[in-house]
Image (cartoon, helix red, strand yellow):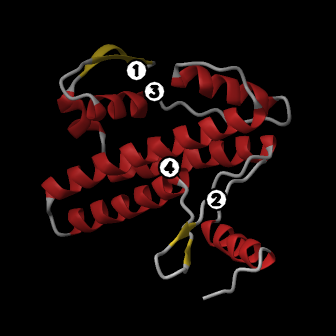
Amino acid sequence: MKQKFIFEFAPDGNVLFTAYCLRTDSWHDYLAFIVDAEHSVATNDLRNSNRFLRAALICLFAHIEGVVNEIHKQRKLPKTRRFSDRISNVEQAANRCSQVPFVNFNLEKKLRDLIAHPGICKPFSEKANDGIILDQNSVFEHLSIANLRKFEQQISHWLDTVCANLKVPRFMDTRKRCDEAIELLKELGVPET
């Protein structure tokens, strides 16, 4: 994969370099928010617990979408607009290499949509619950630490498997990228400061 480095030169001549990866940072944000939610529950702070759970779910989906988009980009999968189609493309490609575990995140995706687009309603059907309409109250009824942790385990296993099958890293090692940048600068004759 082609890599691009962007260096900034400070007025004093020092070279500045920072490595970012939003899909990786979104995962760490998710982990931080879920821990914050757990602490809020422990102190009986329901308002903050709900706030942290909503933020955690949004960050978890940012991570999922970031990984799926990176796989699409690196493996040159067919371009699609819908997230569900991109998920299907990734799953099909990964299944050609080795079996991918089944994961159903229909409810979690609908909860994410309700959080990201307040005021909408989403139809929801599952074996035991046919024809339910989810609304903003559903977020508070269905989003819990236990449900989110369960989803985290399922989706992590799925992401790890598709990434391994398709040889696309799930996370970027930003520390390694900084070290690579330092080595590149040395090769160019720029002194380390």
Q: Is residue 13 left or right of residue 168?
A: left
> Label 1 neighbourhood size at 10 Å, few (<14), some (14-19), many (20+)?
few
Q: Is residue 15 left or right of residue 134?
A: right
Which secondary structure, mark 4?
helix
Which label sits in the foreground, 1 or 2?
A: 2
How far, Cα to Cα, is label 2 from label 4? Answer: 19 Å
Q: x, y (%) of residue 99?
A: 79, 35
Labels 1 and 3: the sequence-earlier one: 3
> Label 3 neighbourhood size at 10 Å, few (<14), some (14-19), many (20+)?
few
- Name the residue type under label 1: Ala
- Name the residue type under label 2: Met
Q: Is residue 145 above or below residue 89?
A: below
The residue at which mark 2 appears reads as 172
Q: Is residue 82 above or below residue 47?
A: above
Q: Quadrant of residue 71?
A: top right
Labels 3 and 2: the sequence-earlier one: 3
How far, Cα to Cα, is label 1 from label 2? Answer: 40 Å
Identify the residue shown where x is 28% and y is 60%: 37
Q: Is residue 170 above or below residue 180?
A: above
The residue at which mark 4 appears reads as 152
The residue at which mark 1 appears reads as 128
Task: State the count of labels.
Answer: 4
**Which residue occupies the foreground of this view, 50 or 167?**
167
Q: For the C terminus, which image quadrant?
A: bottom right
Q: Quadrant of residue 74?
A: top right
Which label sits in the foreground, 1 or 3?
A: 3
The residue at which mark 3 appears reads as 106
**Which residue occupies the foreground of this view, 120 or 168?**
168
Which secondary structure, mark 3?
helix
Which label sits in the foreground, 2 or 4?
A: 2
Labels 2 and 4: the sequence-earlier one: 4
- Name the residue type under label 4: Glu
